[in-house]
Image (tube, rainbow, N blue to C red):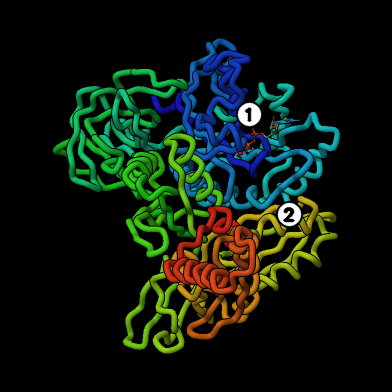
Amino acid sequence: YPTELIRNFSIIAHVDHGKSTLADRLLELTGTIKRGHGQPQYLDKLQVERERGITVKAQTATMFHKHKIIGLDDTSTQEPQSFLLNLIDTPGHVDFSYEVSRSLAACQGALLVVDAAQGVQAQTVANFYLAFESNLAIIPVINKIDQPTADPDRVKAQLKSMFDLDPSSALLTSAKTGQGLEQVLPAVIERIPPPPGKSESPLRMLLLDSYFDEYKGVICHVAVVDGALRKGDKISSVATGQSYEILDVGIMHPELRPTGVLLTGQVGYVVTGMRTTKEARVGDTLFHHRTTVDPLPGFKPAKHMVFSGLYPADGSDFEALNNAIERLTCNDASVCVAKESSTALGLGFRCGFLGLLHMDVFHQRLEQEYGTHIISTVPTVPYIFEYSDGSKVTIQNPAALPSNTKQRVVACWEPTVLATIIIPSEYVGPVITLCSERRGEQLEYSFIDSQRAFMKYRLPLREIVVDFYNELKSITSGYASFDYEDADYQASDLVKLDILLNGQPVDAMAAIVHNLKAQRVGRELVEKLKKHIDRQMFEITIQAAIGSKIIARDTVSAMRKNVLAKCYGGDVSRKRKLLEKQKEGKKRMKRIGSVDIPQEAFHELLKVS
Ligand code: GTP
């Protein structure tokens, strides 16, 4: 395929506006997959994706479509030509915008899908700007026009006022009934330019993604930017300097189909001798061995927004968890992992994630795909602390911070985000209240049309990772949409909150909180823990402390076994002995401090902000 006949495009949208369904329909329309293949959402391959109905990993598929380009000189006599179309499906949730920007790097155009009833939402805005900044041709697609509440004209007006997109350029579709779908591929071919690469230049290809296949080993998804690649070629990596032989090369159609060659502008897969996906650095430039090329711009490295500890639920399963994490991170390079140990939980890992959903998905995949049982600790965001000796450290685990911060810390900073919130105008009041409770600073407030308000806030990241979105949804009856991008660090007043069980600090439960909120958070944490710790044979004291100051305290009383029950008659000294023994027992238990804490307690802690 000459590059003029290739189009690389992506579908971007707010979550649930119908990207994956539309992608399925296009694959069916081109005969790439059979109609009614029995699996809804073909490109959502992972079990967690099907269960949650969300796309997590971007997937790619090649389709072929015959089309006659109108406007060429001899249209009447021209035969329709076969075009090679690469569709890159992208995840819609905010945590996965990293995957979205990666996908866009291999595209020249994007279908911007907007729900005809819901209109422009927060992620529509975020995704539009990602595509716009990458200079992509944008085709607006107003989907779900079959719904009774669909109002395509209103959506067209929003597209015009927010993005200056020509209302007449919008396609109206229903991915459900099939209405309007026939216009989509012709629009892709006519409005999106072919890839700009030079076929006569030396090979440069961008490594988009990689995963581990049990039979073939590491499979890399690549976009050939310049030149061509053939089976048997020797290639090198800019990032690692390693060289490999191309053992297999082909396209995703949508299953792997060997073609022996990939030409300029094509997107496909390669199998090399790579043993682990660690060698396959996403964003890397691959080139022919012994040639010199300028590296491609690559990607911004993934930024980890939340960190949490992962421990085997049963101490002996450490190796199993280690293996599972190693294999799963092969498939999800955006998670960072370091070993750590906790006095309370033993050996485990500190993992960094792009967001809470990303973290949840990772946990779920560990349990479902690898059968592990884990305990995860309260997620925290990366704070920066400056100590009195002038050193600055990034703290990803609250336990690593000395308890008496007042003595040693001279300054601290916390990460913030720029949040976009779109809501029906009647909810403006409650949303403003929520954002100020969460220490937000309003940056922008305007109206998209007569019914919808648009707000921009700077918020501390810590305030949104914990339950912000749910709260926002509940105060707006589910109508709010929300998206954020990471912004700078800002100076803050932070303290370490320790949780003590029977006087012993539990490192895995320590948290870093804002000074103004410390009292309330401390009380809530103690309350939550009390609910979840079962009564045991001895009394359990739960305390929250800042430095040496206890700010909240409660107890779980002991189950009092009536040791005197068997003691008939009136032998006082025997009774006393038994009671004495019981007290001894309790003390011993206290000393050991073997309090059983269920995982739910950790989950509950997560919800306190
Ligand atoms: P993510 O993969 O999570 O980002 O979502 P998505 O944007 O891919 O949305 P998806 O395709 O999963 O569709 C969301 C829901 O909308 C599904 O229940 C679809 O069946 C439904 N849906 C998609 N297109 C249409 C349509 O044209 N009309 C109607 N009525 N429903 C649709």
Relative to the observer, which residue lies in front, 107 or 483? Answer: 483
x%, y% of residue 165? 67, 46
The answer to whether residue 208 is visible is no
How much space separates mark 1 and mark 2, taking CA atoms? 26 Å
> Which SS class for mark 2?
helix
Give neighbour class at mark 2: few <14, some 14-19, many 20+ (Cα, 10 Å).
some
Is disc 2's CB within 8 Å of ligand 1? no
Image quarter where ligand 1 lies: top right
> Which SS class for mark 1?
helix
* Of labels 1 and 2, the one closer to you: 2
Classify the position of the N terminus by image quarter.
Answer: top left
Relative to the observer, which residue lies in front, 357 or 324? Answer: 324
x%, y% of residue 410? 42, 87
Figure quadrant of residue 453: bottom right
Relative to the observer, which residue lies in front, 538 or 104? Answer: 538
The answer to whether residue 148 is visible is yes
Q: Residue at x 27, y 31 (%)?
A: 200
What mark, if any, has residue 473 been given in the picture?
2
| Residue type pointed to by label 1 | Leu
What mark, if any, has residue 22 been given in the picture?
1
Examine the rendered structure and indicate whether residue 529 appears above or below residue 223.
below
| Residue type pointed to by label 2 | Lys
- Is 390 left, or right, of 127 in this rendering? left
Q: Earlier in the sequence, mark 1 or mark 2?
A: 1
Give neighbour class at mark 1: few <14, some 14-19, many 20+ (Cα, 10 Å).
many
Is disc 1's CB within 8 Å of ligand 1? yes
Examine the rendered structure and indicate whether residue 407 appears above or below residue 329.
below
